[in-house]
Image: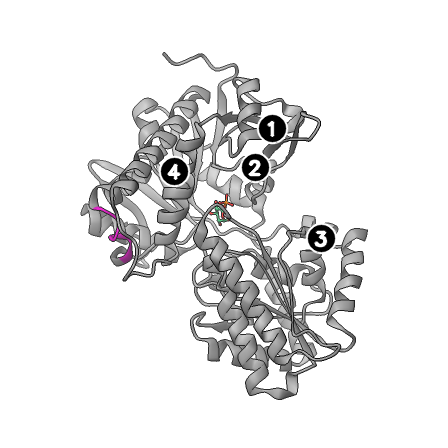
Amino acid sequence: MVAQPVHPAPIVVASNRGPVSYRRQDDGTLVAGRGGGGLVSGLGAIGTDAGAVWVCAALGEGDREAARAAGRRLDPADTGGHRVRMLDIPADTFAAAYNGIANSVLWFVHHLLYQTPLEPTFDADFRTQWAAYEAYNTAFADALAEEAAPGAAVLVQDYHLTLVPGLLRERRPDLRIGHFSHTPWAPPDYFRMLPDDVAGQVLRGILGGDRAAFLTHRWAEAFAACCAEELGAEVLRDGDGRATAVRFEERTTLLGVHGLGADADFLRRRAHEPDVAERMAALRAQIGPGRRAIVRVDRTELSKNIVRGLLAYRRLLEDRPRWRGKVVHVAFAYPSRQDLAVYRDYTATVERVAREINSAFGTEGWEPVVLHVKDDFARSLAAYRLADVALVNPVRDGMNLVAKEVPVVSDHGCALVLSREAGAAAELAEDALVVNPYDVEATARALHEALLMDPAERAERTKRLAAAATALPPARWFVDQLRALGG
Ligand code: G6P
């Protein structure tokens, strides 16, 4: 029996992580804080008057308690005024869906992270987790079916929720449903490592919507190719040969591409607040007078390729002794998905390699690698402002916003060493030094060239990079998708 919604919404957003998260304080009270993730600013763009509802999952115990206490919707005082429904999914179902399938299978597939002689192995545990993923997607579809007004636009986000468009269409054929992938999409040969029934369910799930959208044409093409190879679907193309839609079992799902740019106004304002200036002073002291800074800022995420970045820096110091004592690698690697052993091991490797470089090359008064692992947004902005070189070398990335944020706030121009496998390379390649992220030698050479770049050229390139990086502000990313759905 479907409960009647309090206010059916004309726009509904669904994502795993919502705009708010709760934690219980020592005195027993539950406090709300801003949730992580970039979607918050995108949704903020439509304002609180549009009557949109955001459906998300309770991520931890604090969230679950808040979701249970709220019943249907959270208190808007906690959510910046947004109408948010947080789903109280049982902890073990959530863990199996999020850690098991979303982060250890789908994320690995789309970022080509498996070490194939050893993994993946799809066994009985996988099947248990897959059932949890289906249950988690079903909980979203049920809630969305309740929250959406007749004919509403529903915007479903990411690899956590691939089954939702199809499940929701069964429940509410009147809705306009879009799915957006914030990740890359795997090429068919890699995607088809998934068991056939699972690969088919993921594709059919997304094709249950009216639109499937991606950050770049490359990922949209990969999705279309998977639909053709796995399902035998027909791919429709425009005059330039670009995939525009997938036709499967009498339905046509449009393909869309919406790049996501940096939020220039927010970043420029935030980067000039006093706490950022304080952190710049502290960082300058750590780097030392007259030295150059090669900066990287990432979650400690396997796809970000932090270890090869460190090895490239090591190579630079080995091959080009002129830089010894003259440069510091400022590496921020913030904790991510620490429930997964492979992430904890990766974090330990990053720390070990940084230590090894420091003990091999460091001298009295010069620490070659300054590694910070505690998340601090003000310090990230401080590093962006003073960077001489930014290193963004993911093995694969849907977009990568760091590559776009650095040029926007840079004080005196910053050379960008950028992986060709980041979605951002499609927009920034002309003024970045583009590298193959697996090629440590080539990355070391690019760092050397970046350090040598003439300051005037560097400033010019940074200006052009900033213009390209802000061409698609987050607000437009959201509004364009709504329009494309006919909202
Ligand atoms: C990155 C990806 C998003 C994804 C998010 C999940 O930001 O670009 O596609 O939704 O990670 O991260 P989480 O910390 O929620 O696992």
**Residue under numbered circle 2:** 43
Q: Is residue 194 magenta?
A: yes
Q: Viewer-nearest of labels 2 and 4?
A: 4
Q: Position of residue 362 (x, y in %)?
A: 66, 78
Q: Percent from the top left, x then y, of residue 41? A: 60, 41
For numbered disc 2, what is the local secondary structure?
Answer: helix
Whether ligand 1 has any atom under 8 Å from the Cβ at mark 3 is answered as no
- The image's mark for residue 82 is 1
Q: Secondary structure at mark 3?
A: helix
Magenta extent: 190-195
Q: How many other residues sit within 10 Å of disc 1, few (<14), some (14-19) or many (≥20)? A: many
SS state under label 1: loop
Say what amino acid the circle numbered 1 marks. Answer: His
Identified by mark 3, the residue type is: Ala
Say which residue appears at 47% left-offset and 54% top-offset.
Answer: 343
Rounded to the nearest whole Å, what is the CA distance between mark 1 and mark 3?
25 Å
Q: Earlier in the sequence, mark 1 or mark 3?
A: 1
Looking at the image, residue 321 lies above or below residue 203: below
Q: Which quadrant does the N terminus fall into?
A: top left
Name the side, left or right, on which 395 lies relative to 360: left
In space, the residues marked 4 and 1 are separated at their CA atoms by: 29 Å
**349 part of magenta stretch:** no
Q: Earlier in the sequence, mark 3 or mark 2?
A: 2
Of circles 4 and 1, which is in front?
4
| Residue for point 57% across, 55% down | 471
User: Local crowd at mark 2 within 10 Å, few (<14), some, or many (≥20)?
Assistant: many
